[in-house]
Image: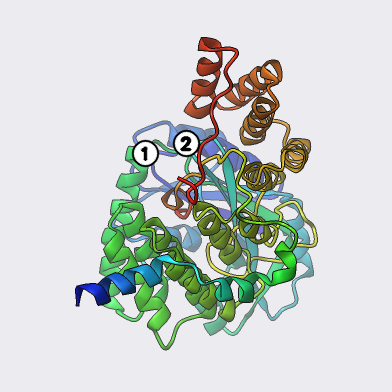
Amino acid sequence: MKRKEQQKTKDLEAIDPAVLEEILGGAQVAGIDDQRTTGTVIPQIPFNSFFHS
Amino acid sequence: MLLSVCLITKNEERFLAGCLESVRPVADEIVLVDTGSIDRTIEIAEGAGCRVLHRTWDEDFSAARNAGISEARGRWILCLDADERVSDSVALLAAIHEAAPEVGGFLIERHDIVTHPEDGQTDVHPIEILRLFRNHPAIRYEGIVHERPNETVICAGFQIRSLTTAKLTHLVNHLPQERLEAKQQGYLRLLDRELERDAGNSWAHYYRGKTLWFLRRREEAEAAFRGIVDAEECPISLKASAWCMLAALLSEQGLRGAAVECVQESLALLPDQSLAFYVLAEVLYADGRFAHALAAYRRVRRSMDPESGPSQVLGDLCMTPGKRGYKLGCCYLALGALAEAEEHFREGLEGEPDHGGCHYGLARVALLRDDLAAARVRLEAAIQHDPTWKVPRELLADLHRSPLTPAPATPSPKTA
């Protein structure tokens, strides 16, 4: 049961590349590799700061 | 008399004068219903020539608005809040003069300007809102909170059109946090009352979800949004937006796979919206997928783009030139593509010379090139733009402490 729960959690955490491909299309990100994270990552502010009006 | 401007107020001394100024060229009269101000609101209103009506606040926004509308003498009504401003108000008159007899009201695009205290940056959320309508006895506001006159315009036998020539600006977060929280607590109480009366009111469920989220009651917020996406009868724009809210809530919990699937659901309902792509971009950035985030940010509409159509979903979002330059620049910076990062930060500053985020981004680029003098200049510009933003201030202090050692790069979530 615990393993099943863990599996469920893992699935929720992992982004499915096929879903991304479907939304964004492969051509739009061609030539740039996500793994090339050699630079500086400026943290963005949390979602909770955005969506109230 | 052609146009009556109607407002309801309570302690709006900080905002009221700007609002009244924006409608002065077109208002034949301004009817202001005050529900118990103890600040200078009444003095400002009377000084500007408003007709002031006093009314006891009975926890019903529609009742207060309708009290003002009932007293209005113009053939058309423009309803505003004190923290809203009209741009190109003369366009309102043109729309009224040209309105066909069957047109009962106009949707006006309102830009909700949200300023984030965390980084001094500004977001623009465009929504279409019915604020200009005929003075007709059957057209009245409905709902005790987040009130709308839309259905009564239709029931009165009229049509609703979109007005693209005038816009409203709404200064959202320009209140201290305690006042914002108190306001949201009040909204929640009214929304619960509204839902007791009409449990199937999708709008009330949606706003309740957002309010709960603001008050950090995340599980209840998630339940509210799930209720909307599962509802059989609910406007598509509301459902699409609720999927995005769910995506953001799930992402906050680290459930980014589930979040992206919610975005996919939202886009399946309304493919041409910006909100879903913005949420997706933020989720991907948080996940360290900077190239994909870049692609998603590029799909978000630009606020200054005249080709951009009206917003598609409730709570839609567009990026100002500065914000867009900042977001794209951040992605390139994370990817180690300094020339592209610099190009986008500079582009952002061309559109918004005071954009603190872009100055900060250029400071990071300069640091990576060991150009400490340029970094200092940019950090000072960022601080000047927003003196309360801690991040550039701390980095500048670090540089002063150890001027020959650039600040280390923050590891990405993937490599941490």
Whole-angstrom CA distance, mark 2 to mark 1, is 10 Å
Front in this rendered view, residue B154 or B276 = B276
- Mark 2: few/some/many CA within 10 Å (<14, 14-19, 20+): some
Q: Secondary structure at mark 1?
A: helix
Same chain shared by disc 2 and disc 1? yes
Residue B384 shown left or right of residue B179 in the figure: right
Q: Secondary structure at mark 2?
A: loop
Which residue, given by chain and number where applicable, does mark 2 sit on? Answer: B117
Kind of residue indicated by mark 1: Gln
Dividing the picture into quadrants, the one containing residue B98 is bottom right
Camera-side mark, 2 or 1: 2
Q: How is the image coloured?
A: rainbow
Looking at the image, is B205 positioned above or below residue B92? below
**Could you say which disc has been placed on residue B177 in the image?**
1
Kind of residue indicated by mark 2: Pro
Tag 2 and tag 1, C-beta contact below 8 Å: yes
